Amino acid sequence: MEEEKNKIYVGNLEYSVNEEELKKTFEDKGIHTKNLKIIKDKYTGKSKGFGFVEVENEEIIQQAIDSLDGKELKGRKLRISRARKPKPRFERGRHPRFSR
């Protein structure tokens, strides 16, 4: 699967962690974030326990993995990795095996 440029996946977040707390976690390790988003359920608005962080360059991604992967935040060990591009979604009613 293809990786997203300059984007980090952050998994195993405790559900109460907000974007400010996550940003501070990165900044405490000297990692400047350009953009940050915790993914939330579209119906309840509650965290799904993961998010994405955009940084300046590829070197910072490796720095984040080295310094934060496995570190605890609110009692849970973070999973930090390079973000991957999402799989393509098919249009409603159009299945690739049944194209006309």
Image (cartoon, helix red, strand yellow):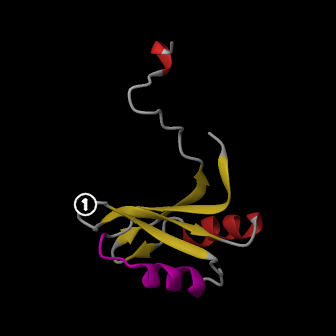
Q: Which residue is mark 1?
A: 43
Q: Position of residue 43 (x, y in %)?
A: 25, 60
Whether 69 is among the magenta residues is no
Question: Who is closer to the viewer here, 69 or 96?
Answer: 96
Q: Residue furthest left?
A: 44
Question: Who is closer to the viewer here, 75 or 45?
Answer: 45
Whether 23 is among the magenta residues is yes
Q: In the visual, does 84 lie left or right of 78?
A: right
- Label 1 secondary element: loop
Q: Position of residue 57 (x, y in %)?
A: 75, 68
Q: Is residue 28 above or below residue 39?
A: below
Q: In the visual, does 8 lie left or right of 79?
A: right
Label 1, residues with CA under 10 Å away: few <14, some 14-19, many ≥20: few
Q: Name the amino acid, label 1.
A: Tyr
Q: Residue at x 43, y 69 (%)?
A: 38
Specify the segment rendered in magenta: 15-28
Q: Residue furthest front?
A: 100
Q: Residue at x 48, y 15 (%)?
A: 97
Q: In the visual, does 9 lie left or right of 30?
A: left
